[in-house]
Image (spheres, rainbow, N blue to C red):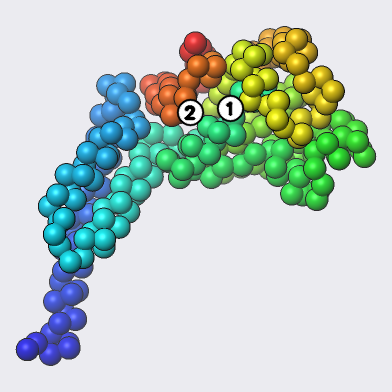
Amino acid sequence: MNSYDDIMKNIEACDDKIIEVLNERLAYTEEITKYKAEHHMPILRHEEEVRQLKNLAGKYSNHPYKEEFEEIFRSISVSSRKIQAEVLFPKNIVLIGFMGAGKSSLASYLSENFYMRTVETDREIVQREGISIPEIFELYGEEYFREKETEVIRELGTGSRKVISVGGGAVMRDENVKHMKASGVIVLLTATPKAILDRVKGSTERPLLNGKMNEDYIATLMKKRSARYEEVADLTIDTTDKTIPDVCEAVISKITASGSQTTKTVLS
């Protein structure tokens, strides 16, 4: 039997081999990510990832350490997606749009699949103030809330690889837009008034809709803001009949296709 020291040396030799193979594996990940971007191929290909994992599972299905193998290969998949994000869009993604357009859902999905830090300006304000947004409006008024919103947007603009979801009225201030443009690509999410109502009608955290939770009022409020939204957006996507994965793929594809440049794009 080998001595303890001999066994440890063998383990270290195995680790060296693992590092060498992982370097090769991750280099191929970078290569295929760039290929997808250059040829406008879908970046998120969950079916492909599932197929790969299933194929691998068949090679160790009877192994006593099957669960450990599964954990290792899932971790490699996670690392691969993280590398994709770093290669494809190193800048921030700023999500704007009317309440209920899907900003929070898309931000969560981007964070989960590409490991970008997600920040919602409304939630950040609530954490800092220690009270809800309706309470801020009631106690201090909308102007106070807007000042705090600008403060948060300015601070969040530093750094990179964040998904910043801003409140529905944030783009009405030029100062906010300036900070958004400087920090990344502005993505406008839209939806029909009916779709918006269906998504927010159960919420009590929409002070601008208090007592006016109906399709006509939402349409009126959206019309007041739509021109401004379209003016500042680099990319516009209608989320009405799209799933969040579909919206995510559209955002990523257009950002990577333009090389993260601010060329206006509208997707229906």
Q: Residues within 10 Å of mark 1 (few under 14, many from 20)?
A: many
Q: Amino acid at mark 1?
A: Gly
Residue 259 % position (x, y): 41, 25
Q: At 76% from the left edge and 39% from the top edge, which residue is drawn?
A: 151
Residue 163 x %, y % = 55, 37
- Indicate whether 54 appears above or below 67: above
Q: On the picture, is 6 further left or further right than 207? A: left
x and y percentages locating residue 5 in the rendered image: 17, 87
In this rendering, would 235 be left or right of 174? Answer: left
User: In the figure, 68 relative to 117: above or below?
Assistant: below
Circle 1 is placed at which residue position? 102
Question: Is residue 24 found left or right of 96 in the rendered image?
Answer: left
For mark 2, does the 10 Å Cα neighbourhood hold few (<14), some (14 to 19), or many (20 or more) residues? some
The mark that comes first in sequence, 2 or 1, is 1
Quarter containing the N terminus: bottom left
| Residue that label 2 marks | 244
**Is label 2 in contact with label 1 (beta carbons under 8 Å)?**
yes
| Tag 2: amino acid | Ile
Q: Nearer the viewer, residue 50 or 228?
A: 50
Q: Quadrant of residue 205?
A: top right
In the picture, residue 195 is in which quadrant?
A: top right
